[in-house]
Amino acid sequence: MAGSLVLASASPFQRMLLENAGITFQAKAADIDERAIEGEVERQGSSPEEVALILAEAKARNVGQAFPGDIIIGSDQTMSIGTRVYHKPLI
């Protein structure tokens, strides 16, 4: 039998999506350096969509280590125009 559902994110917007759908889950922020991962995959020529998928997987794998047997949802969003990715402000 599958375990609990865990959202690998600190994003209030992603939590709200699941809450509004009436889904029971817990949320845990991933302990990864998103900017370092983005920088590396962007240098490799990854598209904005690929960057988001790679970050989502990294978050899920990181949080999954603390929740073996549970179902982990890793997600990420990127804002881009063409191939240019815009990042969150550092504030």
Image (spheres, rainbow, N blue to C red):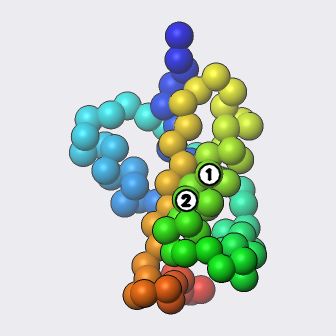
Question: Quick one: which residue is furthest to the front in this view?
Answer: 45
Percent of width and height locating residue 17: 31, 50
Q: Is residue 69 visible?
A: yes
Can the viewer see residue 86? no
Q: Amino acid at mark 2?
A: Leu
* Amino acid bearing label 1: Glu
Give the x, y percent position of residue 34. 67, 69
| Neighbour tally class for label 1: few under 14, some 14-19, many 20 plus, Cα within 10 Å | some
At which x and y percent is residue 85?
51, 84
The residue beneath circle 2 is 53
Marker count (numbered): 2
Q: Which mark, by number, is residue 57?
A: 1
The residue at 67%/38% (across/down) is 64
* For the residues bearing labels 1 and 2, Cβ distance under 8 angstroms: yes
Residue 2, position as x, y percentages in the image: 53, 17
In this view, 35 is above or below 31:
below
